[in-house]
Image (spheres, rainbow, N blue to C red):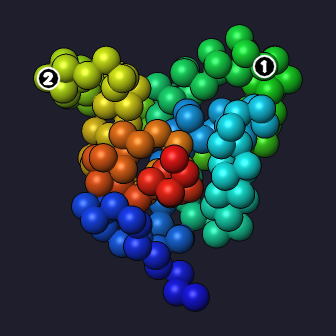
Amino acid sequence: MSACAESLNPLAIPVCRTDPCFLDTSALYAVFDRAQSRSAAAVAAWEELVRSEAPLVTSNYVLWELTALLQRRLSLEGLAALQEFVLPWVEVAWVDPHLHDLASGVLLSARRRDLSLVDCASFALMRARGLRRAFTLDRHFAEQGFACLPDVLRLD
């Protein structure tokens, strides 16, 4: 099997499994919360991603959102596990004022209540850094043309 795979999304550019991957809140949370309906798909994708040794990137906005979810819905132990077992291998890119303003503008112009500022900041950051794939359960990433791990278009 080739190291590169095509997404079902015709807008997505084929990517290699060793290409850097952006980590989104939805999939990371599902790895910690095994009661989530798509947790098994997220865990399998996470294990594949870790084995691939691809560089992992997330944003301070994603970490803020994930921290709030883990602390409120699960436990401080989940938050400690994130800090100890995940974050040491992840590059945290900070959303600067320019990216924040760009994301805010996209959010307001999209006029969609189901889209968040964190999502829009993630898209802006991914484009600015040339990232083409995301570890996510959020279909918005596929809509934006990013390759998703797991393939969110097959999960529903």
Q: Position of residue 153 (x, y in %)?
A: 44, 53
Question: How many badges with numbers are in the image?
Answer: 2
Snapshot quadrant of residue 120: top left
Residue at point 56% right, 28% down? 63
Say which element carries label 2.
helix
Residue designated by label 1: 74
Q: Are marks 1 and 2 in contact (CB under 8 Å)?
A: no
Q: From the viewer's perspective, is 35 left or right of 97? A: right
For this orientation, the residue located farthest to the front is 156
Q: Label 1 vs label 2: CA separation?
A: 34 Å
The crowding category of the residue bearing disc 1, from other C-alpha atoms within 10 Å (few below 14, some 14 to 19, many at least 20), is some
Q: What's under tag 2, amino acid-wise?
A: Ser
Check disc 1 and give the amino acid type: Leu
Foreground residue among 80 and 146: 146
- Residue named by callout 2: 109
Q: Position of residue 41 (x, y in %)?
A: 67, 52
Task: Tell me residue 134's x, y (percent).
Answer: 47, 51
